[in-house]
Image: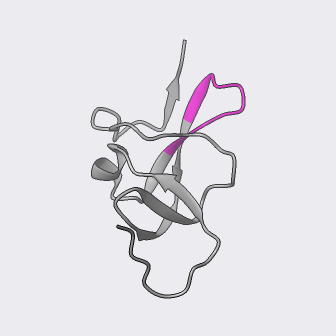
Amino acid sequence: MNLTLGNSSQSLLLPLGGYIQDTAGSWVFVLDNSGEYATRREIRAGRRNNQFLEIQEGLQEGEKVITSSYNQMVDVERIVFQ
């Protein structure tokens, strides 16, 4: 069952994942267009349910975010993929 409280609105939603435990929704790793690296970026989160986090600032539609755990990367600013 889904329950909606309040008015519905258009929102940018990010799927919940392990990252939420490590960042409390304050930052994420965003992939660059080439997919060669990801950079840490501050975000401002809004509402949240059991599946999604509403993004109010810091991300644009279509950007790709790493949603797995950041447990071993909390002090890292950039991840390079080889």
Residue 35: say if magenta. Answer: yes
Front-most of 78 and 22? Answer: 22
* The quarter of the displayed image where residue 70 is located: top left
- Across and down, in percent, residue 53 comes to 45, 61
Compared to residue 21, the image places residue 37 above or below, namely above
- Across and down, in percent, residue 26 comes to 42, 59
Compared to residue 37, the image places residue 19 above or below, namely below
Residue at 39 percent across and 76 percent down: it is 3
Residue at 58 percent across and 27 percent down: it is 37
Q: Quadrant of the N terminus?
A: bottom left
- Across and down, in percent, residue 34 comes to 71, 25
Residue at 27 percent across and 37 percent down: it is 71
Residue at 29 percent across and 32 percent down: it is 72
Front-most of 80 and 54? Answer: 54
Front-most of 77 and 2? Answer: 2
Compared to residue 57, the image places residue 70 above or below, namely above
* The quarter of the displayed image where residue 82 is located: top right
Q: Is residue 33 left or right of residue 50?
A: right
Magenta-highlighted residues: 29-38
